[in-house]
Image (cartoon, rainbow, N blue to C red):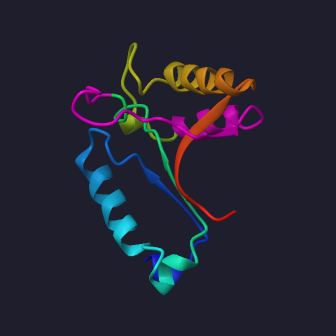
Amino acid sequence: MIDRAAPDELYLPYYHDLHHDHRALSYAALVHARAYLERGSRIRLIAMYETPTETHLFPASLHPPFAPNMWVDISGTLETKLEAWACYRSQQLPGQTPRSPEALKAQAVVRGAEVGTAAAEAFLVLRSLV
């Protein structure tokens, strides 16, 4: 799929989150996008993102915790993100859970506070040729 899409940026779920499918996807993409291969050499940015419902569930003593090194200001698009999230009803859980719109907004506000914006998303950059 990477060959057909020919992306210059690749965003993957954090490799060490709790969801096995996320790990499998990240591993497969990293193998496919190796920089010394022609198909991988075109990819100028590889970054992993946190998934609020999975990334922070492994104890840090078992797996490396998510430690972002890139933030993107989403202050102007946070409401659009929350509207998009509302379309995925099967993924939402009632009450105080990481899958609630309130929790997603709170995480964006915390990430924004880390870099002085109203809201942000955080990433762990693995490759940057930008």
Of 33 and 6, the residue lying toward us? 33
Residue depicted at x 42% and y 49%: 13
x, y percent for residue 93: 36, 25
x, y percent for residue 129: 64, 65
Residue depicted at x 75% and y 24%: 116
Residue 75 part of the magenta segment = yes
Residue depicted at x 41% and y 24%: 98
Residue 72 part of the magenta segment = yes
x, y percent for residue 87: 51, 41
User: Hey, which residue is sitting farthest right in the picture?
Assistant: 76
Of 8 and 78, the residue lying toward us? 8
x, y percent for residue 47: 52, 53
In the image, residue 120 above or below residue 49: above
In the image, residue 91 above or below residue 97: below
User: Hey, which residue is sitting farthest top in the picture?
Assistant: 96
In the image, residue 121 above or below residue 111: below
Within the image, what quadrant is residue 76 found in?
top right
**Quadrant location of the C terminus?**
bottom right
**Quadrant location of the N terminus?**
bottom left
Residue depicted at x 40% and y 46%: 14
Q: Which residues are magenta?
A: 57-86
64 to the left or right of 100: left
Query: How many discs mark residues in the rendered view?
Result: 0
Of 14 and 63, the residue lying toward us? 63
46 to the left or right of 119: left
